Image: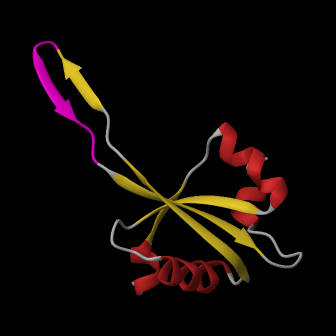
């Protein structure tokens, strides 16, 4: 497995992220230590598209309770990728 697949963990499929596809913006869960340049190269390598811009966000985990026991979900990193040109990512097109 190459480094690109270690950086891009999974696509995020939500109502908001599906609405952004019209603007050629795709949302992914990425490795916490990945930077914008690594994310851009990984997306270009995996999906064979040209990336215009990468926006990243650190998502803080939420506090969860089960009875008296309190825990916390993991923190994770989200990347919103904007593409150049007319090419799209076919994986997301099949979901619409």
Q: Count all numbered tags in the image, as a single digit.
A: 0
Query: Would you place residue 8 above or below residue 13 in this image?
Result: below
Residue at the image position 59 percent from the left and 86 percent from the top: 45
Q: Position of residue 7 (x, y in %)?
A: 42, 74
Left or right: 91, with 23 as reference point: left
Residue at the image position 48 percent from the left and 83 percent from the top: 38
Left or right: 74, with 56 as reference point: left
Q: Going by the picture, which residue comes out furthest to the top?
A: 67
Front position in the image: 58 or 48:
58
Residue at the image position 72 percent from the left and 57 percent from the top: 92
Query: Would you place residue 22 above or below residue 34 in this image?
Result: above
User: Which quadrant of the view contains residue 69?
Assistant: top left
Q: Going by the picture, which residue comes out furthest to the left?
A: 68
User: Which quadrant of the view contains residue 87?
Assistant: bottom right
Q: Is residue 38 magenta?
A: no
Q: Position of residue 57 (x, y in %)?
A: 48, 57
Query: Would you place residue 11 above or below residue 1 in this image?
Result: above
The residue stretch that appears in magenta: 67-74
Front position in the image: 56 or 15:
56
Identify the colour scheme used.
Answer: secondary structure
Q: Position of residue 90 (x, y in %)?
A: 75, 66
Front position in the image: 60 or 15:
60
Q: Quadrant of the N terminus?
A: bottom left
Query: Would you place residue 35 above or below residue 17 in this image?
Result: below
């Amino acid at each position: 497995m190459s480094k690109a697949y270690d950086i891009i963990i999974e696509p995020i499929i939500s109502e908001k992220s599906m609405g952004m596809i019209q603007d050629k913006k795709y949302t992914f869960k990425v490795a916490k230590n990945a930077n914008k340049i690594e994310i851009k190269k990984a997306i270009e390598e995996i999906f064979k598209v040209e990336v215009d811009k990468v926006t990243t966000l650190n998502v803080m985990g939420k506090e969860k309770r089960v009875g008296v026991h309190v825990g916390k979900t993991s923190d994770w990193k989200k990347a919103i990728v904007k593409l150049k040109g007319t090419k799209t990512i076919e994986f997301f097109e099949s979901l619409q």
